[in-house]
């Protein structure tokens, strides 16, 4: 590990990041195809195993914990076996559920079915989503607000991870924004197609598709500048898959950041969660927007080369920075 990586990882260690948003159980059901059914022209999949991983806001928390930070996770876990499996997965990832609320709905779950023949790589053939059927009730909403107030009072940054499953509403967002302004800590937003409803944050990390939903296809850098100003952000970090990232920052020219590593990903599941986790750790550690984005770009490049919902480790991030980053310590913002 060189001086840059040494200094960076040391700054990450112990940083407290409050993450409020939708907790998802990412399940991977794998099986072996051995024959065709006599009942219908379909393959029969013999179940091998089902693995549950933290997804959504829970995945962002797992990435923060993996890099030595302290995630303060606020959200809802379901009152069913999938919720219990998610809780176990969080605990095994060193993520505390102290501020997590047990809901009245079954756990939001994404089941990815992976199939293949003997001695062949298994591929995803279908995804089955179990989504909440009703809005969060008033009592649970009050519990979430109370948990956010408690967690954010000791946090070095706040992350909004909105997958549009109901946890993040105007009340929760306004509370997070108020705390970030009062305590002068960064507020970073990742929202699935609701970014325009969440103005005023320190930064936001939409992907290319989400920006196209707002600006239309073939948007230009100047369009992103206008969007950033419209949403009253300090910066806008657009993730662009194998094209890297685009950072828009007040008072600076747009910065294109090339992708690190292979441009042919193995699996992009949860890559955005990893990016916002590392980006928030960087900003909480005093890095500039550009420095934090650069490090998050390395982390994203690592996890897309892993199968399933994954986290980046200290060793992996250090090695990537050592190989590709400038050999100088990060400077404070």
Image (spheres, rainbow, N blue to C red):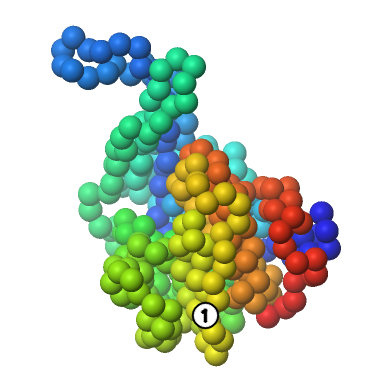
Residue occupying image coordinates x 34% and y 45%: 108
Q: Is residue 319 above or below residue 141?
A: above
Quarter of the image where the N terminus is located: bottom right
Residue drawn at x 59%, y 82% as measured from the top left: 184
Residue 109 in sight here? yes
Q: Position of residue 23 (x, y in %)?
A: 42, 51
Residue 227: where, in percent of width, then height?
Answer: 38, 81
* Residue 17 to residue 254: above or below: above
x, y percentage for residue 250? 52, 87
Count of residue discs = 1
Label 1 crowd (10 A; few <14 / some 14-19 / many >=20)? some
User: Which residue is situated farthest in the left direction here?
Assistant: 39
- Among the 4 quarters of the image, the one containing residue 18: bottom right
Q: Of 307 and 327, which appears nearest the observer?
A: 327
Q: Quadrant of residue 114?
A: top left
Q: Which residue is mark 1?
A: 254
Give the residue displayed 46% in from the left and 82% down from the top.
233
| Of 287 and 101, the residue lying toward us | 287
> 103 above or below 31?
below
The residue nearer to you, when weighing 229 against 136, is 229
Residue 179 x, y percent position in the rendering: 51, 77
Is label 1 in a helix, a strand or a loop? Answer: loop
Residue 113 vs 60, above or below: the answer is: above
Q: In which quadrant of the rendered image does the C terminus lie?
A: bottom right
* Residue visible at 65% across and 77% down in the picture: 288
Residue 35, picture quadrant: top left
**Residue 154 seen by the camera:** no
């Amino acid at each position: 590990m060189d001086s840059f990586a040494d200094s960076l990882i040391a700054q990450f260690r112990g940083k407290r990041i409050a993450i409020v948003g939708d907790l998802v159980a990412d399940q991977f059901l794998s099986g072996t195809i051995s024959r065709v059914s006599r009942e219908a022209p379909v393959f029969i999949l013999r179940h091998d195993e089902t693995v549950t991983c933290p997804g959504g806001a829970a995945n962002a928390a797992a990435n923060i914990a993996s890099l030595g930070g302290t995630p303060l996770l606020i959200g809802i876990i379901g009152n069913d076996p999938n919720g219990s499996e998610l809780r176990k997965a969080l605990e095994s990832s060193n993520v505390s559920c102290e501020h997590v609320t047990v809901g009245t709905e079954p756990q939001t779950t994404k089941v990815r079915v992976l199939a293949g023949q003997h001695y062949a790589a298994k591929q995803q053939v279908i995804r089955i989503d179990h989504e909440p059927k009703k809005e969060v009730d008033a009592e649970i909403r009050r519990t979430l607000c109370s948990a956010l107030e408690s967690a954010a009072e000791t946090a070095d940054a706040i992350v909004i991870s909105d997958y549009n499953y109901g946890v993040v509403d105007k009340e929760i967002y306004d509370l997070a924004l108020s705390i970030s302004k009062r305590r002068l800590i960064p507020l970073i937003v990742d929202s699935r197609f609701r970014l325009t409803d969440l103005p005023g944050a320190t930064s936001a990390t939409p992907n290319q598709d989400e920006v196209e939903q707002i600006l239309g296809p073939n948007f230009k850098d100047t369009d992103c500048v206008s969007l950033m100003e419209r949403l009253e952000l300090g910066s806008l970090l657009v993730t662009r898959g194998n094209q890297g990232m685009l950072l828009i920052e007040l008072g600076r020219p747009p910065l294109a950041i090339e992708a690190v590593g292979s441009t042919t990903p193995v699996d992009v599941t949860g890559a955005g969660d990893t990016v916002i986790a590392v980006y928030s750790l960087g900003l909480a550690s005093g890095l500039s927007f550009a420095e934090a984005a650069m490090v998050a770009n390395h982390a994203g490049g690592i996890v897309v080369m892993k199968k399933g919902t994954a986290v980046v480790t200290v060793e992996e991030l250090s090695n990537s920075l050592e190989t590709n980053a400038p050999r100088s310590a990060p400077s404070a913002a």
